[in-house]
Amino acid sequence: MTIAPTPAPAKVLRTEYQKSVASYWNKEKDPVNLRLGDVDGLYHHHYGVGEVDWSVLEGPEETRDERIIAEMHRLETAQADVLMDHLGDVTPGDSLLDAGCGRGGSSIMANARFGCRVDGVSISEKQVEFANGQAARRGVDDRVRYHFRNMLDTGFETGSRKAIWNNESTMYVDLFDLFAEHARQLEFGGRYVTITGCYNDVTGGRSKAVAQIDQHYTCNIHPRSQYFKAMTANNLVPISVVDLTAQTIPYWELRAKSSVATGIEGPFLDAYREGSFHYLLIAADRI
């Protein structure tokens, strides 16, 4: 597979908003991301799902926080496994794309599971540098590579991807533009998967709690319906929709008790519990 040259930064960051988002993530050194990744070297930028082992709150006080961190990391890694369960029949000869890859943990997991090539893209140069360093340390940099590119225009070849995913990164872009680019890169019958937070437009516009989440992360959370409209417009047919809201609430309850809580835990829990915010997995096939 031929890979296009890496675009110059001026072409990657095309708007003032994209520059502000890139600046945010270039400066970000949040312990809620870094300390969890230090557990086993898989650095994620997403939340967790599954039942919490609440016994981590028991035992010696001096190691309590260490146990909580390890449990939170287990839950966020479980979330990535759930996403990959929906990527379809991936073989070692296939190429995947991690769109909005963060510090790259999910790409490394995909390569370990499928043996395939994985490219990750981010508009944060610091994230790309960090992720490539992790791939090199693991000895998989010949199969897992990260690029400073815009996921709305990656430069990768048309029809070159068996599967593409976004893990909590769609709220930074226009969905119609994003899915048009994904559809271009996917082979016919290829699979797209996203896990995302979206606001419930059945109950109206953004709730106060959702607006607080937007402000905290400098993002623009989309209404649930917008995902399906944008997919339909770009030859992506949803085949599976999984509501993970109930499965992510325990993660947030545990995170609120941790030393790495950031203050956004309350708005997330309020939004999930009141029904104004959903945590969805959507898998779609390229037709």
Image (spheres, rainbow, N blue to C red):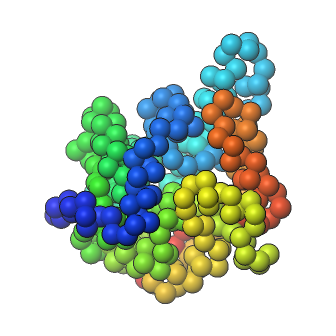
Closer to us: 23 or 234: 23
Rendered location of residue 64, percent (x, y) = 70, 20
Asked whether residue 184 is in view, the answer is yes
Q: Residue furthest right?
A: 274
Quarter of the picture holding the C terminus: bottom left
Image-quadrant location for residue 171: bottom right
Taking the image as shown, residue 134 lies to the left or right of residue 141, namely right
Image-quadrant location for residue 135: top left
Image-quadrant location for residue 140: top left
Q: How many marks?
A: 0
Identify which residue is drawn at 79% across, 75% down.
203
Identify which residue is drawn at 68% across, 58% down.
212
Identify which residue is drawn at 54% across, 58% down.
218
Image height check: is 182 above or below 8? below
Taking the image as shown, residue 46 lies to the left or right of residue 29, namely right
Image height check: is 133 above or below 217? above
Image height check: is 160 above or below 44? below
Asked whether residue 118 is in view, the answer is no
Rendered location of residue 33, percent (x, y) = 52, 39
Closer to us: 105 or 143: 105
Closer to us: 251 or 92: 251
Quarter of the picture holding the N terminus: bottom left
Closer to us: 223 or 209: 209
Taking the image as shown, residue 213 lies to the left or right of residue 269, namely left
Rendered location of residue 89, percent (x, y) = 43, 61
Identify which residue is drawn at 68% across, 48% down.
264
Rendered location of residue 282, percent (x, y) = 58, 68
